[in-house]
Image (cartoon, coloured by chain):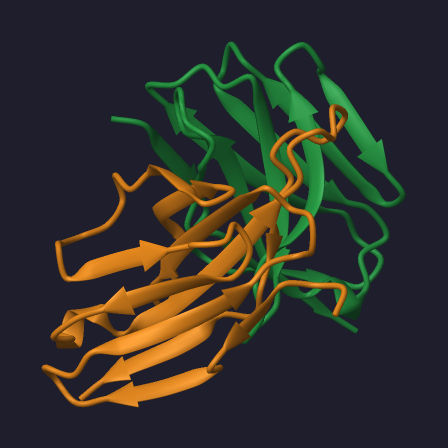
Chain colours: A green, B orange
Amino acid sequence: SQKIEQNSEALNIQEGKTATLTCNYTNYSPAYLQWYRQDPGRGPVFLLLIRENEKEKRKERLKVTFDTTLKQSLFHITASQPADSATYLCALPRKGRRALTFGSGTRLQVQP
Amino acid sequence: GAGVSQSPRYKVAKRGQDVALRCDPISGHVSLFWYQQALGQGPEFLTYFQNEAQLDKSGLPSDRFFAERPEGSVSTLKIQRTQQEDSAVYLCASSADRVVERPNEQFFGPGTRLTVL
């Protein structure tokens, strides 16, 4: 069955450093991959989408890479700020369906 | 409003009670999704509507779960004879289908936190 893995341990970094989060998947060849941000008590918010034929995508301080050979996506936040502290979820479209399959998320804590 | 809204935000039910959770999607969004999110986990898909048609209900965990979207806008998720394992946050999301550059970008509501005692 399709499986998505994200680091379950929280990632703690100092303000100004680059945060790197990992998303690995198995038994799947998705046409695209999405990243969402979720704050406590709120629903996820869409951040970025990267397609299978794209190696890298950038948006302001965010960068996403997609390696379909390794079946892995990396999500980077450069010049991190305490306001970036949240849980970050990667999501793939379910095979042949519209719904998304989400990873369990990685909690990022940026220390001032 | 501009976003997806859900009500109630919190619901406490006694085991065996029926509950109904409401979702108001973004106006004009054709697609509507329900997800269940347990503490510390990512959202798990429950069901999907395109307008009023329920096209995918493969994620509904049992026949106690029922969803409808009769007029293609507001949706209701109903859980009958609630059990303790139903305690979770129930998220609704909507999506516009014709955004080529961001396929299937989903806009989520704040969720309804259901606690079954």
Name the quadrant of the C terminus of chain B. bottom left
Q: Is residue A57 above or below residue B34?
A: above
Name the spot of residue B32 as percent of width and height, x first: 51, 48
Name the spot of residue B115 as percent of width and height, x first: 28, 83
**Residue at point 74% right, 62% down?**
A84
Q: Nearer the viewer, residue A59 or B51?
A: B51
Q: Quadrant of residue B78?
A: bottom left
Q: Is residue B56 above or below residue B87?
A: above
Q: Is residue A27 above or below residue A108?
A: above
Q: Can the viewer see residue A77?
A: yes
Name the spot of residue B49 as percent of width and height, x first: 44, 43
Name the quadrant of the N terminus of chain B. bottom right
Horizontally, residue A41 falls left or right of residue B66, namely right
Horizontally, residue A3 falls left or right of residue B8, namely left
Number of numbered discs present?
0
Horizontally, residue A42 falls left or right of residue B50, namely right
Horizontally, residue A11 falls left or right of residue B87, namely right
**Residue at point 45% right, 45% down?**
B52
Q: Nearer the viewer, residue B86 or A52?
A: B86
Name the spot of residue B92 as percent of width and height, x first: 49, 59
**Residue at point 80% right, 63% down?**
A15
